[in-house]
Image (cartoon, coloured by chain):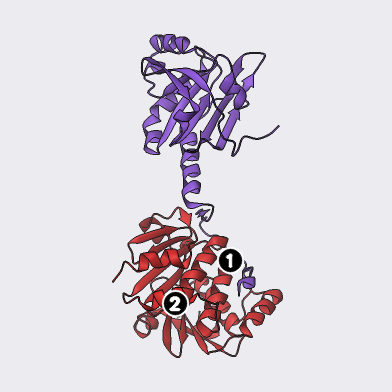
Amino acid sequence: MEHMINKKVEEFQVSAFSKGEFIDVTQQDLMGHWSVLFFYPADFTFVCPTELGDLADHYEEFKKEGCEIYSVSEDTHFVHKAWADASETIRKIQYVMLADPAGELARQFGVLVEKEGQALRGAFILNPEGVVKAYEIHDMGIGRNAEELLRKVQAAKFVEEHGDQVCPAKWQPGEETLSPSLDLVGML
Amino acid sequence: MDIDKISSKSSLMTPELEEQIKGVFAKLENNLTLVCVIDPEDSTSVEMAELVGHVASLSDKLSCQLYDHVQAQEQFPELDTSLLPATGLYRQEQYTGISFHGVTGGKEMNSLIFAIYNASGPGQEMEKRIKKKLDKLTHKNQIKVFVSLSCHHCAQQVITCQKMAAECEAIEAQMIDARLYPELVEKYKIERIPMTVINEKETLLGSKNMDEIYQILRTYK
């Protein structure tokens, strides 16, 4: 199976539910800012509102990083609205909820379980050019963590801004001095 | 520990490494003194003193002088002896602006060997246009490069900054092993390395080239 890293989002057009309204979203809307595409199996399920609520609670932090969130399920935008009407957790969501009943997006990102017509729990981080820089895919029953996802967005942004010329600074108290090594002598 | 009893044989040195270093040191042109200021009661200080002594013994162009930090503060005011162990490179008794704070183990052995090569001569080649720019600097610039001994990019950044110091009297460049100074990690909020602090004001992350560093230095008049 081919991986998704550095793949650019292909053309798509889907309906969506956003702050009480129905809108259309295309791949162009994902350009110019960081994006998270957050797939989940279906509306009106138990694990999903927990995850989506967790994401809603951290939405402002994602916005501060210049990152937009798009949740995606294989439901229609009408079902998203009905779910928001019925659930307080879903009602507080400020990010855009994409409707993908034809499986166009889920198929593009390799998370569609065709037999069930549902998406696996996949979260994809796209850079402002619409290119996938990180992702995670969980089986249906395994929830994700918004804080963890935020850290990944921050890390992806950091690497994009600073290249790979830095190392994380992790020191353990009492570490021994590393044995010296000369590997730059060729630069002389 | 009695400072006079510190060995000039380091357990960090291997015969293979000695041979590699001797190959570089065969090219050295001018005498250089490695002044190593230590706390004789501190094992990290002793480790660096032994390593510097061992490195110096590999060339007749080099000498090593060990000092207890209590006496050294007045004798070497230009060397930051608050960060021990502190090792400064001196050419004809003049401070080159190059110092190391910590033990130059791991990848930082590259930094030490390059600093010696650059300060003693012939040194790495520097583009004439960069040298011309550096010659115009008048403000005394202080560059701190925070490193981890396992970080390849850190050694590159230290070598670049210390090469600039070797070529320009208006620049001082310190290598600082951040692991040994948690108060500085806290002060400068160091989460990634190499992190370079210029004149206590500007911060650079990652390995930068001389042009990029110069663009910051030139803003200080």
**Image coords of residue B73 (percent x, y):** 36, 80
Question: Contact, CB < 8 Å: mark 2 with mark 1?
Answer: no
Foreground: disc 2 or disc 1: 2
Residue drawn at x 58%, y 66% as measured from the top left: B107
Residue drawn at x 32%, y 62% as measured from the top left: B201
Query: Which chain is tinted red?
Result: B
**Image coords of residue A54 (percent x, y):** 44, 26
Q: Is residue B128 left or right of residue B8?
A: left
Q: Is residue B155 left or right of residue B99?
A: right
**Image coords of residue B124 (percent x, y):** 55, 77
Determine whether the residue tagged by mark 2 lies in a helix, strand or loop. helix
* Tag 2 residue: B131
Report how far apart the C-alphas of labels 2 and 1 lie in the structure. 27 Å
Tell me which corner region of the image, top left, top right, bottom left or bottom right, holds residue B139: bottom left
Q: Residues within 10 Å of mark 2 (few under 14, many from 20)?
A: few
Q: Is residue A174 above or below residue B49?
A: above
Q: Are marks 2 and 1 on the same chain?
A: yes
Determine whether the residue tagged by mark 1 lies in a helix, strand or loop. loop
Q: Chain of mark 2?
A: B
Q: Nearer the viewer, residue B202 or B215?
A: B215
* Tag 1 residue: B107
**Image coords of residue A183 (percent x, y):** 64, 68
Query: Which chain is tinted purple?
Result: A
Residue drawn at x 46%, y 26% as measured from the top left: A70
Residue B127 in sight from this viewpoint:
yes
Q: Nearer the viewer, residue A177 or A34?
A: A34
